[in-house]
Amino acid sequence: MEQIKQTILNKVIRPRPLHSYKGNYGRIITIGGNYNLGGAIIMSASACVYAGAGLVTCATDKHNLNALHTRLPEAMFVDYSDFSDLLENLTKADVIVLGPGLGLDKLAQNICQLVLSNLSLDQLIIIDGSAITLLAANPGLLTYLKKGQAIFTPHEMEWQRLSQIKIADQIPLKNKQAQLKLGQTVILKKYHTEIYHPECDTPHQLTIGGPYMATGGMGDTLTGVLAAFLGQFSSAPLTDVIDAAVYTHSAVASKLGVNNYVTLPSAIIAELPHFMNCTIKE
Amino acid sequence: MEQIKQTILNKVIRPRPLHSYKGNYGRIITIGGNYNLGGAIIMSASACVYAGAGLVTCATDKHNLNALHTRLPEAMFVDYSDFSDLLENLTKADVIVLGPGLGLDKLAQNICQLVLSNLSLDQLIIIDGSAITLLAANPGLLTYLKKGQAIFTPHEMEWQRLSQIKIADQIPLKNKQAQLKLGQTVILKKYHTEIYHPECDTPHQLTIGGPYMATGGMGDTLTGVLAAFLGQFSSAPLTDVIDAAVYTHSAVASKLGVNNYVTLPSAIIAELPHFMNCTIKE
Amino acid sequence: MEQIKQTILNKVIRPRPLHSYKGNYGRIITIGGNYNLGGAIIMSASACVYAGAGLVTCATDKHNLNALHTRLPEAMFVDYSDFSDLLENLTKADVIVLGPGLGLDKLAQNICQLVLSNLSLDQLIIIDGSAITLLAANPGLLTYLKKGQAIFTPHEMEWQRLSQIKIADQIPLKNKQAQLKLGQTVILKKYHTEIYHPECDTPHQLTIGGPYMATGGMGDTLTGVLAAFLGQFSSAPLTDVIDAAVYTHSAVASKLGVNNYVTLPSAIIAELPHFMNCTIKE
Amino acid sequence: MEQIKQTILNKVIRPRPLHSYKGNYGRIITIGGNYNLGGAIIMSASACVYAGAGLVTCATDKHNLNALHTRLPEAMFVDYSDFSDLLENLTKADVIVLGPGLGLDKLAQNICQLVLSNLSLDQLIIIDGSAITLLAANPGLLTYLKKGQAIFTPHEMEWQRLSQIKIADQIPLKNKQAQLKLGQTVILKKYHTEIYHPECDTPHQLTIGGPYMATGGMGDTLTGVLAAFLGQFSSAPLTDVIDAAVYTHSAVASKLGVNNYVTLPSAIIAELPHFMNCTIKE
């Protein structure tokens, strides 16, 4: 496996061109957060805004409107059960996050169906959490994806559901085979997260981060950083952009972990603008 | 074009007279924030309070009540679909912000109609975002405006709608002609924002700020700073007050941009009281 | 007039006895905050908690529940239109704040009637904002007050309504006469606020503070500090406690005013625990 | 009595194993927070997340959804009146907090019944506040508890209700007898809190902390720290884990008390990750 090095940050996070505007940094829609799991999609959207995305819309259960606006007035709101509104906003997006806190019920299934069946070729989609479980249960939806259009972010159990490889058998060789069959990027979240890129024979491995990250919401936060990076660093190779996003997420946590027993997603999110600025100064 | 210089801050932001009270610093109403775009008007109202306005009322969709009070207990709330209540509060205001997150639907149109047709001669109004688009579509509403009573804050596409000048053709000469015809101040938001004052032949140009400001909500925040400056610095020339507000907004962002890859509206808002204090100490 | 000096702080704000618990520091209820003015009572309750009150309940419009708990999870909530619940909590209180953001409608009138007519002899009540206007319009309610039981916190217009003295005629001699007739403490909020104590021939005057305090919500915040001081410093003379609360409120603002053009109520509230600690260390 | 010493922190709060994930740090459910007392359960859940619990679900009145997600997007939400959903989440938990802000009404009684009657043998439960009062009134529920499975956190009046020992008579000997009869751990909150462990003849006593802690919500916060410690330090002796949690709660307050006249629960919660990190560095 190939270790992701800190130098990936400088390759991807570049000083912004002076003459640019928010339209240059991506229009993102994050979709998830049911009645019980609203915090998940709020953390995803927040990470996305704080990591520099141009415009962020959060499609979620209507009960989450106030918490979203309170934590993140910078984001727009869509009631995800209003499929006409959801579709309209979906169409405008450059990058889609599907899954944080989405749940597994009929509405969640219908949202997955709507999103997957309406993707356009130039959109990128990050598929996380319960959306992975739903696609594993309904693999026909995978056929809507153009090769390399999606980034899956499973933890080991979700990867088992999607790849049919038992956790104990998830060795790089088998994971790579399953990823090739899937035709999409796979970020396998675990101790020393592994990234299987369609373009790379060898998986990339993250060796930073630590057990201070073992707390709820960490994966939701990663989806937001990924989306922001995909939205704004579209001129860099996709492989590098994904590696840099995953590295950034854990590097911020490492920095906070020096002084905190547990590094909460909220704290990681708040630190993103400063951390990203430090990388361009080094 | 004439560059706006930092010295404008000292001309406008003056030490407050010792013997003064909140009534001296303007009564502002910010109107906008529909069901989907509540964050926009919350950012406008917040910037207004933090930039020193005396009293701020936020008229918005009723779903935004809690997010407003949570982020900004200093502001009062009006349900903008309650036209009797809206009108009553409108009448009391010195300065009106119309447009952030207002949207384009029938209710938004009716609100524009109500606000424009009930302006009194001594009120100033900042017209932003979708309100510009609505007035462009219904130019009859422009006749309610006394010459020089309004400040329009379009980005280039909104200016195209209002002025009928295509973006590629938006050169100072043509912009000035359109502004003269409009009879109002125009703040054309773009790389190096241009301000067309009714009183000035040459547009004023902002040369500070940077690409860290390329994020959603930046324009909403500007409307709040403008309103606060109009409300509290009413003894300075209007031209200077507008220039100082636009300059302040970007100067705060510049200051934060030294340490942050992206300068979020929330962060700019929080920094306003300190920044304005620094200017009077220099 | 007698100037309130900084030494009042050390007379009132004392190191807490080691062996004490929250019951020793007062049970406060703050009543106000209608559908439009929820922020007012949230600021009052927040100042109360941050200034050291033992237990704080906020009785307000039901729409304000979430904003209250989000800003101040330390406070309890009562829907003030549920008179049975309101009365039950009222009865338990040592100190009552009535008025911030209460409004003037029929419900507000009924709440005033309920509160005044159910006071017990050992309770103290702070009457602020619209509650002053309502009592001025319905002076029969004043008869429910035991001499010296209430602290009125009018600004000049509210004092005119209550005392029938026109603002231009509000000189200390006339104010004192009106206060004597009223039989209660009067804190007349103005440039150099004047406090008329029942026990003192000469009004006490506040000469600190400044125009950075000229912003909405400042008076609401004062009511919370007053209530907290009355609740926890009950062994000091009432005159001193009131003077110390008024002084503290402006002293915190002065401290923040060194670095901020405007000192927002939220910022003052957050600084209270640190400021009060500094006084006991000097 | 045996004083709890600072060394307990190093015995319990250990550097996390590198190869670990959130599942290793406990799945907690906090149950409470009725329509009036939502802040209590939010503080409990927040303390739990900030003290390092792996996954936290908050079961509460549906009105508290937004305040919960706004303050703590890291937590999941359950409407506690939906017994099917509550039961499902209850079953998954390693540690349960029952009581903060629960109230005493019929619904609260039914929730206590549901929780107690569905405990599994390997779950730990912290019983606080009104849940103690409810169990005192309905002692049949106590029979559902396996010996040593519960930690009760009464203040003196709640302990009187549960133990039938009048406050004046609550001497260690009698308290120990009552605790032995109860068969559970008792944390008797008072000046110098006493902990009665089933395994220890002598009560353990907390001698740190101070009167800056005399404010509402302090006990709610303790329940969260306790739950987090039970969830993540399950390999240490239960006695030590409980002592360390109680010590940590007051030690954080002491640290903040150096600079604050009152140490609010919100401030204590925010400091937990940093404090716990300091202990492993000493």
Image (cartoon, coloured by chain):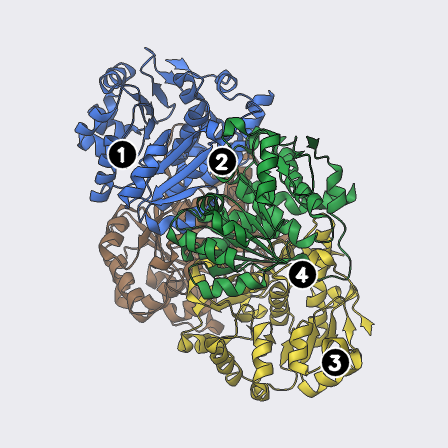
Chain colours: A yellow, B brown, C blue, D green
Quick check: A199 left or right of D84? right
Asked if marks 2 and 3 fall on the same chain, the answer is no
Q: Is residue A91 above or below residue C118?
A: below
Q: Position of residue C234 (x, y in %)?
A: 43, 21
Q: Chain of mark 4?
A: D
Distance between the alpha carbons at the discs numbered 1 and 4:
51 Å
Q: Position of residue A120 (x, y in %)?
A: 54, 84
Q: Nearer the viewer, residue D152 or D222?
A: D152
Q: Secondary structure at mark 2?
A: loop
Q: Which mark is residue A175?
A: 3
Mark 2: which amino acid? Gln
Q: Chain of mark 1?
A: C
Check disc 2 and report the residue beneath it. Answer: D164
Q: Assess whether mark 4 and mark 1 are in contact (beta carbons under 8 angstroms).
A: no
Q: Chain of mark 3?
A: A
Q: Nearer the viewer, mark 2 or mark 1?
A: 2
The N terminus of chain A, quarter of image:
bottom right
Mark 1: which amino acid? Val
Check disc 1 and report the residue beneath it. Answer: C115
Q: Position of residue D257 (x, y in %)?
A: 61, 32
Sooner in the amino-acid sequence: mark 4 or mark 2: 4
